[in-house]
Image (spheres, rainbow, N blue to C red):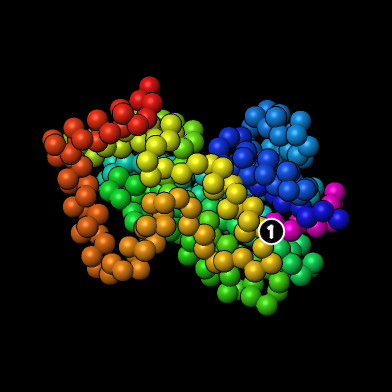
Amino acid sequence: MRDTVLITGCSSGTGRVAARKFLDDGWTVYATARDRDELTALDERGAHTARLDVTSEDDVERVVERVVDEQGQLDCLVNNAGFGQMGPVEDVPLEKVTAQYDVNVFGPHRTIRAALPQMRAQGSGTIINVTSLTDRFPMAGTGSYSGSKSALTSASQALRQEVRGKGIDVVIVEPTVVATEFYDRVREELVDVDHGAAYTDLYEILELLHTVKSGGPGITTPEAVAETIRIAADSDDPRRRYSVGSSAKAGVAIAALLPESMRTPVMRAGVEVAGSCPGKRVLQWWFSRNHDVN
């Protein structure tokens, strides 16, 4: 029997590409998203598709039960669904922070709790949680998003210890900035935050984030992230953490060499330089040269 994978957040970007790669590799794929209509192309490719809003426990339980009923196994769970709520901590209202954690932290918690009984019963399985380089290097203006990814990382590390000896692997895939439509929603969520006058320069920097969807130096691709996810799922002995993208790999090296006490001052200095008049001019020139600013 072919291995079975359940992937969240397949409407676009990394999730959609990952579903295709698993299909090409011969897996039985259950591709999910909040809007099932956005999964038509994957349906035509041979994936089983389903509506799954990770903030709904009923949705999660229904889909996992369907996978087990139809396949009798669940070999890999990929927690990819997520979004980025940007903005200074002072300006982002609590309801938006709650929504961020509901998707990025509580969503994976729901799917993991639903999947573990089957994985434990079959004595095998891999749980792959997609986090972010911001876990290691949180930047001003990303507090809600970075905090949610750090929480998912910590939960993954604890879970790995809890399921040790049960045949279950827990893997963190940690990309740098990825060229996807993810940043369109980042921009939408940022617009909905009341911009405090105290952070004008920071908002100007954050506004440029949507342009990274066009790719460019230091930005990785959804194909690279998806291929890493597939490699981890195929491995009999996957690594605990996979960093994806040149800047992510550089970040790992820097994190190993730079004491924690120095990281925040270095990041703060970087943001201050970027927010200065010369810094903003350089950023605007670089983004306009390398990315689509429309």
* Picture residue at 74% right of the left edge, 67% below the top: 124
* Picture residue at 42% right of the left edge, 57% below the top: 249
Q: Quadrant of residue 206?
A: top left
Residue 26: % across, % down:
77, 48
* Picture residue at 55% right of the left edge, 37% below the top: 13
Classify residue 69 as left or right of residue 282: right
Residue 60: % across, % down:
68, 48
Residue 106 in magenta stretch: no
Establish if 3 lies above or below 185. Answer: below
Is residue 79 among what the camera can see? Answer: no
* Picture residue at 79% right of the left edge, 67% below the top: 122
The residue most toward the top is 294
Q: Could you say whether the residue bearing mark 1 is in a helix, strand or loop?
A: helix
Which is nearer the eye, 292 or 161? 292
Q: Which residue is mark 1?
A: 234
Quarter that holds the N terminus: bottom right
Establish if 130 lies above or below 207. Answer: below
Establish if 179 lies above or below 54. Answer: above
Q: Quadrant of residue 108?
A: bottom right
Q: Which residues are magenta?
A: 68-76
